Amino acid sequence: MKRLLTAAVAACSLSLSAFAADEPVDLDMVTKIRDEGFNRSEVMDTLRHLTDHIGPRLTGSPGLKEANIWTRDKLTEWGLKNAHLEGFDFGPGWTFDKAVVFMTAPRRTQVYALPISWHPGTDGVLEGEVFFAPIKSPADFAKYEGKLKGKIVLVDAVPEQKEPKNKVFERLDKKELKEEVNYRIPKDGADDPALWWANYIANQYKLEQFLAKEGAIAMVRKSPRGAMLIEASGYQHKQGLQATIPGVRMATEHYARMVRLMDDGETVKLSLDIDASFHTDDMQSYSTLAEIPGKGKNPEIVMAGGHLDSWFVGDGATDDGAGVAVVMEAVRILKVLGVEPKRTIRVGLWGGEEQGYFGSYQYVLNHLATRPANPDEAFKYSEPYTREFNQFPIRKGAEFEKFSAYFNLDNGAGKIRGVYAEGNAAAVPIFKAWLKPFEDLGAGTISMNDTGGTDHEVFDDIGLPGFQFIQDPLDYDTRLHHSQIDTYDHAYEADLKQAAVIMASFLYHAAMRDERFPREPEPKALPTDKKAADKKADEKSED
């Protein structure tokens, strides 16, 4: 839950460098961490095994389960204790073996397309005429009733052609880091982020169900990326609600060409040959947990994590194999150094992040807190985190009071440049002290702003300290995110070594400080703006 803070508070908190000296930093330990992390690192070996050897790790798939087992065993080999898998209800897994798509008329040419996850295969070659039906939301269904039977339907509009931005690879400069620091004051009446996400997911189910009811034989969506990059993310994984017709995401350029041909009066036809499989032997998926035990019978807990699952079109190297490898390397470093922490240092390698924080939120439910579900029909298709976001009361669990802090890495493979304090002014001087020994590595920016889209949110939203690091973007957003080129080739050794060293130091100092990490006030309900949420879901559906 995001709390409202004034710009004045942000400015004051960021000027408290004088107080940073009050936060002790073990420079001898920092030196040892740097030596081990820079000179005997295993972070790239870990990432290479996850990507080159295991590959895609879609939630529910055999690839994710293999990664769960491998990470559990590797953490045990390094000396961590209580390494185990923690399950959550999810639904069937899904994989594909083949996707061959041709435009067969008005001329024959292969087009680039990949199947949308949790859509069925074609059971051989499927051929049909293409029909263009740009559907923005369920409000558009009526326009196409009775027109789609036997057709392969293109459902996305083609945006106006624009000049591309040529800046593909980026490291944050001083100006951009300052922009991250400048506090973004929340607006009154902001829309509930869970509601627009619920609407976006519900619209995906409703769209496919409408096409199937109308007799369409397949669905084609435009990739939200250009330059022949394909994102094929799909969310219809709920048992009994899977798609019943094949669906593919097509390269934007090939998709737009077909629309232009139809605009010119041509009859366009496609053939699809897709092999896809559903995995129903285990309807649970899993996260991997392990720890370095703290001292005493009931120590407090410090955590770090990233998400082990990935989408299936690439190998999940930067999203989020890099974060997983960094977290694993951080605790490997601490074990090699023989650290005996005051607090337990626990690792969470989450499953199901891409579909809505399934693994990390299940951890919250199991250990930290529960909250009631939203009964609104809009949340029918939503995952637990979305249904329960902004719902009260929060009922505290067994480990709530002894939880200290959680640190997450999931913004690509770029090095750490700083950390988001998530509106927690008391965290700022602590982070200043902890980052001081790493200024020579480019890390030193502290922002009072919130950031979203990572597993730290499930902790922050129940009033516990959860943080995501500021990272260099590299080409994560411009090319890699959820695309088929998210491979090992786009992760860089120097960046991941730097990130692992800083993560290890944060974990060490959080585990050894005298007091539990400071918390923000307990969450209060956010206002809900349903109109804004519906509009945002419609805009995302056009991607």
Image (cartoon, rainbow, N blue to C red):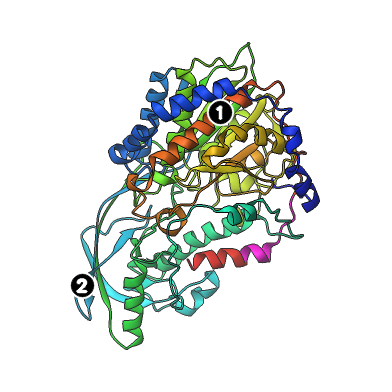
Q: Characterize the local packing of mark 1: few (<14), some (14-19) or many (20 or more) Cα atoms within 10 angstroms.
A: many
* Residue 94 in the image, given as x and y percentages of width and height: 35, 47
Which dot marks residue 109?
2
Asked whether the beta carbons under mark 1 and mark 2 sit within 8 Å of each other, the answer is no
Q: Residue 530's image quarter?
A: bottom right
Q: Nearer the viewer, residue 81 or 91?
A: 81
Question: Quick one: quadrant of the N terminus?
Answer: top right
The answer to whether residue 257 is above or below residue 507 is below
Q: Residue 497's image quarter?
A: top left
Q: Secondary structure at mark 2?
A: strand
* Residue 434 in the image, given as x and y percentages of width and height: 62, 32
Disc 2 marks a residue whose amino acid type is: Thr
Residues shaded magenta: 526-534
Residue drawn at x 72%, y 23% as measured from the top left: 515
Query: Residue at the top extreme?
Result: 296
Can you see residue 226?
Answer: yes
Which dot marks residue 505?
1
* Residue 504 in the image, given as x and y percentages of width and height: 52, 28
Can you see residue 463?
Answer: no
Which dot marks residue 293?
none
Q: Nearer the viewer, mark 1 or mark 2?
A: 1
Query: Residue at the front extreme?
Result: 440
Residue 289 located within the stretch drawn in magenta: no
* Residue 323 in the image, given as x and y percentages of width and height: 46, 39
Disc 1 marks a residue whose amino acid type is: Ser
Q: Secondary structure at mark 1?
A: helix
